[in-house]
Image (cartoon, rainbow, N blue to C red):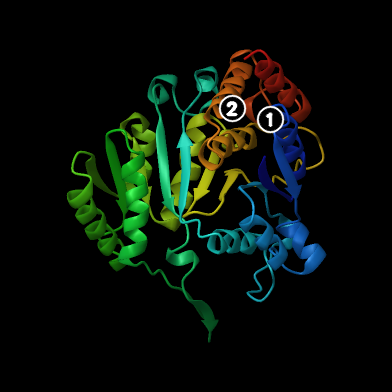
Amino acid sequence: MSRIVTLPGDGIGPEVMAAALEVLGELGDLECEEHVFGGAAIDAHGTALTDAVLAACAGADAVLLAAVGGPRWDTTDPAAPRPEQGLLGLRKGLGLYANLRPVRPVPALYDVSPLRRERIDGTDLLVVRELTGGIYFGERGRSDGRAYDTCVYTVEEIERIARTAFEAARSRVTSVDKANVLETSRLWRETVSELHAREFPNVQLEHLLVDNAAMQLIAAPRHFDVILTENLFGDILSDEAAMLTGSIGMLPSASLGGDGPGLFEPVHGSAPDIAGDGIANPLALLLSAGMMLRHGLGRHDEAAALESAVDRALAGGLRTRDLGGDATTAEATRAVLDNLEGA
């Protein structure tokens, strides 16, 4: 039996996690163990990630996270705990250096996207984001009216994330940097190019500056196969890519590392403005659970069944409020379950 640690987190997190657990319950023997995390953990323990929760996650087969954060924990005090610190600590503690964010607009939702149907038709890309280095983890501080955040990357960190991207590519890797300005980006470009020539000469490699990549992602999304980039750029570009699907509520992700468990979570936030209303879209977490089944547990048939059930539910007319409809969280969950049972 596979052991899963679930982290409902904050805002709509507990609501969409309940939906995911209901669906996963139909897919076989999974032992789920819930722990407090993020803002809820700050309220309970004064820290977003306790040592006990980190140990529980490290001992699991996979970790499923819903959402963290909210205005009640927002602060500019650098000494105050923030929910996002738990997420960074979990990634670092589990050695999760590779974040995979697939972007595949569903034909049933083409008209929900802010882009024209003919522009997004056929888009099927993967953002591979480096997750444990860069400016989010560099030295930072304030003194005498001055603030600084340091961006640092090593050759080893760049090589391992680039290798993940090349191995995932069907034909092309687009490496995104700011090599015309940043020294870390120049090292990034050199290292990616050398790894490509040495180990992956049969995969096409192109380099784009991040500002051009942001433009091309909207202008020609079909062009991309795998987008490889560092932590900060990947954070921004993957959220931009989410809108190709029509809603950030549709985008799953997987964070993977070495031999330990992976972390699987939707890209969306905690949406505190609708928390408790029963209208949150659970589909991104359901698709994240599908990625967990495939990448974390090696249960490819169950993953395919879940993803197919989501597609069929949408094709059958399921629309939550973020998708222009009025389906509740419970109704969306029921629609997926009905299609799962018919698989």
Residue hosting label 1: 28
Query: Local crowd at mark 1 within 10 Å, few (<14), some, or many (≥20)?
Result: few
* Foreground residue among 99 and 206: 99
Would residue 152 be found to the left or right of residue 7 on screen? left
Q: Is residue 209 above or below residue 336?
A: below
Q: Residue furthest front?
A: 1
Secondary structure of residue under mark 2: helix
Q: Is the residue under label 2 in contact with that under label 1 (CB below 8 Å)?
A: yes
Q: Amino acid at mark 2?
A: Glu
Q: Which residue is mark 2?
A: 302
Query: Which corner quadrant holds the N terminus?
Result: top right
Residue at 28 percent across and 67 percent down: it is: 183
- Report the front residue among 72 and 293: 293
x and y percentages locating residue 320 in the rendered image: 68, 26
- Left or right, residue 131 beside residue 8: left
Q: Position of residue 64 (x, y in %)?
A: 64, 45
Q: Residues within 10 Å of mark 2 (few under 14, many from 20)?
A: some
Question: x and y percent of residue 184 in the render?
Answer: 32, 66
Q: Left or right: where does residue 105 sit relative to residue 59?
A: left
Say above or below: 33 vs 135.
Answer: above
Q: Tell me the kind of residue under disc 1.
A: Gly
Q: Which of the marked residues, 1 or 2, is nearer the chain's N terminus?
A: 1
SS under mark 1: loop
The answer to whether residue 110 of the structure is visible from this angle is: yes
Q: Above or below — where is 290 with respect to 315?
A: below
Horizontal and vertical percent position of residue 202: 19, 39
The disc placed on residue 280 is: none
Q: CA distance from mark 1 to mark 2?
A: 9 Å
Residue at image coords 46%, 55%: 258
Q: Is residue 1 above or below residue 108?
A: below
| Image quadrant where residue 118 sits | top left
Query: Picture quarter containing residue 30?
Result: top right
